[in-house]
Image: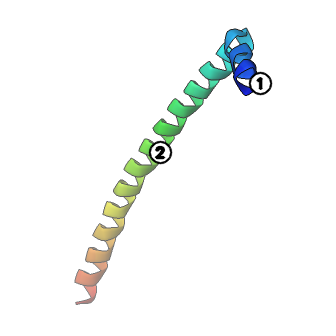
Amino acid sequence: MMLTTLRRFLKSKDGATAIAHGLIDALIGVVIISAVTALGTTIETQFNAIEKAIAASTA
């Protein structure tokens, strides 16, 4: 029964559309994760520079 439903889903155009949308959503997720990771590294570098500047000025 489950296999029959899966086959019917994959044969219909709705199934192809759903798969295409799923792939697009996955790609968007990868792009977002990459951007947030890169941004986080940049922000961390900036905060470290600020920390060093404050430590140097109070020493």
Res. 56 image quadrant: bottom left
Determine the residue positioned at 69% across, 10% down.
11
- Residue 6, image quadrant: top right
Q: Name the amino acid, label 2.
A: Ile
Q: Earlier in the sequence, mark 2 or mark 1?
A: 1
For image coordinates 59% across by 31% down, the residue present is 25
Left or right of residue 18: residue 24: left
Q: Residues within 10 Å of mark 1 (few under 14, many from 20)?
A: few
Whole-Å distance between the Cαs marked 2 and 1? 38 Å
The quadrant in which the N terminus is found is top right
Q: Position of residue 58 (x, y in %)?
A: 27, 88
Query: Type of residue at label 1?
Result: Met
- Front-most of 44 and 37? 37
Residue 40 rendering spot, x and y as whole percentages? 41, 56
Please count the marks in the image: 2
What residue is disc 2 on?
33
